[in-house]
Amino acid sequence: MTRQTIGRAARAAGVNVETIRFYERRGLVRQPPRPAHGGTREYDSDTVARVRFVRQAQEIGFTLREVTELLSVRADPAADCGDVRVRAIGKRDEVEAKVAQLLRIRDALNRLIASCPGGGGLGACTILEAMEHGSTTDDAGPAHPATARGRTNAMKTTELVLEGMHCDGCARTIEAVVGRIAGVRKVEVAFEECRARILHDPAGAPVADLIDAIRKAGFQAAVAGP
């Protein structure tokens, strides 16, 4: 197993030395022991690979806490790819929500800029006026799903036929992504039968939302026939 100084290890992992030391302080990477007779610490190829893994996970949006969880899953012999896929889908959903928020901010700024006369005294500044009166956006943001879509107590069970599953891990992935939808009470997915039974509030979690969530997870779904 190749061993190298921290400087060479950093270059091999595509980071700087301080990044490795930061990962060591956070417990993401184990610091190698110092040689008994002096000298520098030596980092092996497994440590370099671990540093590279942490850096790549951060670059696609995972926090250090989430990276720690991914490392635990990676080291768990009982885990499968479905566990990682669920986390990746959750991260993608977070990114999509942030993108939507940034687009709303951009549109609000465009409206403010378009309404500005572009000159004159500050008393006529429409941008400052809009900020003062809290009218920079058209609405106050998305309402809570329970109030935006109506009642949450009229529960029903919908059965869906699924396509694209390859293992029980796929079934758990579908259970996880659908279970996160507001208005869904219970999800049961049978891999052998390629079916899902979902207890949900049709007002807060319409069938179209259930099918769309499954599609975004990489599978296909349709309402089961009578």
Image (cartoon, grey):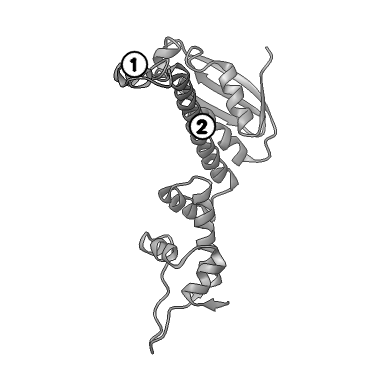
Quarter of image, res 147: top left
Mark 1 element type? helix
Please tell me how many numbered marks the rendered image carries.
2
- Classify mark 2: helix, strand or loop: helix
Can residue 76 be spotted in the picture? no
Residue at left offset 52%, top offset 77%: 4
* Amino acid at circle 2: Val
- Residue drawn at 54 percent across, 56 percent down: 77
Is 65 or 122 nearer to us in this picture?
122
Write down the residue under mark 2.
Answer: 99
Rendering coords of residue 33 (x, y %)? 40, 77
x, y percent for residue 97 = 49, 30
Q: CA distance from mark 1 to mark 2?
A: 32 Å
Question: Is 153 situated left or right of 47 in this image?
Answer: left
Q: Label 1 sits on what residue type?
A: Ala
Q: Earlier in the sequence, mark 1 or mark 2?
A: 2
The residue nearer to you, when weighing 136 against 152, is 136
Using the image as rendered, state which of residue 206 and residue 175 is in the foreground.
206
| Residue 41 x %, y % | 43, 78
Is residue 131 visible in the rendered image? The answer is yes
1 or 2: mark nearer the eye: 1
How packed mark 2 is, by other alpha carbons closer than 10 Å (few <14, some 14-19, many 20 or more), is: few
Q: Name the residue tied to disc 1.
A: 124
